[in-house]
Amino acid sequence: MTPAVKQLEKAGIAFTLAEYPHDPRSPAYGEEAARALGLSVDEVFKTLVARLDDGRLAVAIVPVSSQLDLKALARVAGARKAQMAEGEEAQRATGYVLGGISPLGQKRRLPTFLDASAESLASIHVSGGRRGLEICLAPADLLRLTDGCLAGLARG
């Protein structure tokens, strides 16, 4: 049981779990999850941690089919610039390992932004807090639990 699953259960949110055998040689965790579960790369979202130029960390949740637009993230987070956080920094702040960072149940609550493409989907898949575990839930529930907001964050 991961902290992400515990948070969902405690909140009484409807969700499903999907597990798959993680291949440690896989270069892209989100794409691996989509392939293993037979899902579209547009409905599986990756959780990314970025450092803003004012020193804060922020979480961006974007489809695995896209890249994070760091300028867009900085703008919605009220900063001038953003860059990807170092892996160890992201792990320390969230309490999760790379490839298993969930937007839910993080050690420290960080400002969270969900790509606006999620709004058109009934449900999305995000990491469940470890490699090989995905949570399927409604985007509105994810936003409510993370105090997040929708923003145009994805490019390409």
Image: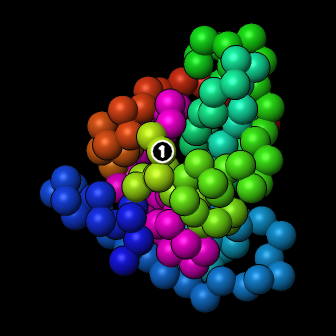
Q: What stretch is highlighted in magenta?
A: 110-137
In magenta segment, residue 118: yes
Q: Residue 114 appears at what percent x and percent y?
A: 51, 35
In which quadrant of the rendered view does residue 34 lie? Answer: bottom right
Name the foreground residue: 25 vs 34: 25
Callout 1: SS: loop
Q: Residue at x 79, y 47 (%)?
A: 86
Q: Can residue 10 be seen in this view?
A: yes
Count of numbered circles in the view: 1
Q: Is residue 23 left or right of residue 93?
A: right
- Asked if residue 13 is among those painted magenta in the image, a careful observer would answer no
63 relative to 91, above or below:
above
For badge 1, the amino acid type reads: Arg
Pick the front one: 18 or 98: 98
- Quadrant containing the N terminus is bottom left
Which of 107/152 is in front? 107
Q: Where is residue 75 in the image (x, y as percent from the top left)?
A: 66, 13
Picture quarter containing residue 44?
A: bottom right
Q: How crowded is mark 1: few (under 14 residues within 10 Å), some or many (20 or more)?
A: few
Q: Which residue is drawn at 19% across and 53% down?
A: 11
Rendered position, 79 above or below 64:
above
Instruction: Name the residue at 36% across, 32% down.
Output: 147
Q: Can you name the residue that lies furthest to the left here?
A: 12
Q: Left or right: 1 with respect to 54?
A: left
Q: Quadrant of the C terminus?
A: top right
Residue at image position (70%, 36%) is 50
Where residue 77 appears, x then y in whole percent? 59, 19
Q: Can residue 47 be seen in this view?
A: no
Disc 1: which residue? 108
Q: Say left or right for 13 vs 33.
A: left
Colour basis: rainbow
